[in-house]
Amino acid sequence: KYADLAEIYKTDCEYPVGTVICVGGENEVTKANITDIPIGVISDSPAYLMNSESDGQAIGLKGRVPVRVIGSVSKGQAVYATDNGVASTLKTNGIVGVALETNNLVEEKLVECVLKV
């Protein structure tokens, strides 16, 4: 249930759980796109939370978290920052993590991943 290390960062808006995040935007961080370097993923219930009294959202930095993924993905396959905070298996410079499950749905869904950012 709680399996990630997270830290609070100021986001430029409220992002849903699983959104891939990078440095930028109006505040500290924003949703990642294909050319960005991801720093983490919006976390729901981190096991360890740093800067817990700060304003912002919990960004999972290490461990296992659900990630917004579009397209089919297989267990053990790497997922990368694609567009608007969503990941896919399309290889880019922005690796997010490794899928811990297989999901053949083409539409966007949450996929449990171990972070490699």
Image: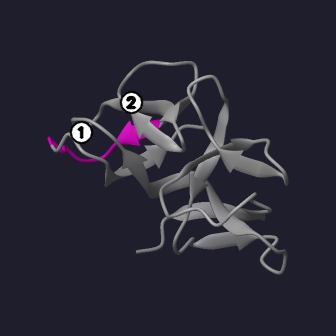
Label 2 and label 1: CA atoms lie apart by 9 Å
Q: Say whether residue 98 is magenta.
A: yes
Q: Nearer the viewer, residue 59 or 17?
A: 17
Q: Say whether residue 14 is magenta.
A: no
Q: Kindly identify the amino acid type of the residue bearing the numbered disc 2.
A: Ala
* Relative image position of residue 72 (x, y in whole percent): 21, 35
Residue where numbered disc 1 is placed? 75
Q: Nearer the viewer, residue 98 or 31?
A: 31
Number of other residues with Cα within 10 Å of mark 1, as a class: few under 14, some 14 to 19, many 20 or more? some
Name the outermost residue toward the left. Answer: 104
Q: What is the total number of numbered labels drawn onto the structure image?
A: 2
Q: Secondary structure at mark 1?
A: loop
Q: Kindly identify the amino acid type of the residue bearing the numbered disc 1.
A: Lys
Relative vertical location of residue 59 with respect to residue 77 in this rendering, above or below: below
Q: Main secondary structure of the magenta part?
A: loop
* Relative image position of residue 66 (x, y in whole percent): 41, 57
* Residue drawn at point x = 70 percent, y = 48 percent: 30
Relative vertical location of residue 34 with respect to residue 22 in this rendering, above or below: above
Q: Nearer the viewer, residue 91 or 113?
A: 91
Q: Which numbered marker is on residue 78?
A: 2
Residue bounds of the magenta highlight? 97-104
Dividing the image into 4 quarters, which one contains the C terminus?
top right
**Image position of 114 (left or right of 84):** left
* Relative image position of residue 103 (x, y in whole percent): 18, 45
* Residue drawn at point x = 57 percent, y = 71 percent: 46
Q: Which numbered marker is on residue 18?
A: none
* Residue drawn at point x = 51 percent, y = 19 percent: 92
Dividing the image into 4 quarters, which one contains the N terminus?
bottom left
* Relative image position of residue 14 (x, y in whole percent): 64, 67
* Residue drawn at point x = 55 percent, y = 64 percent: 43
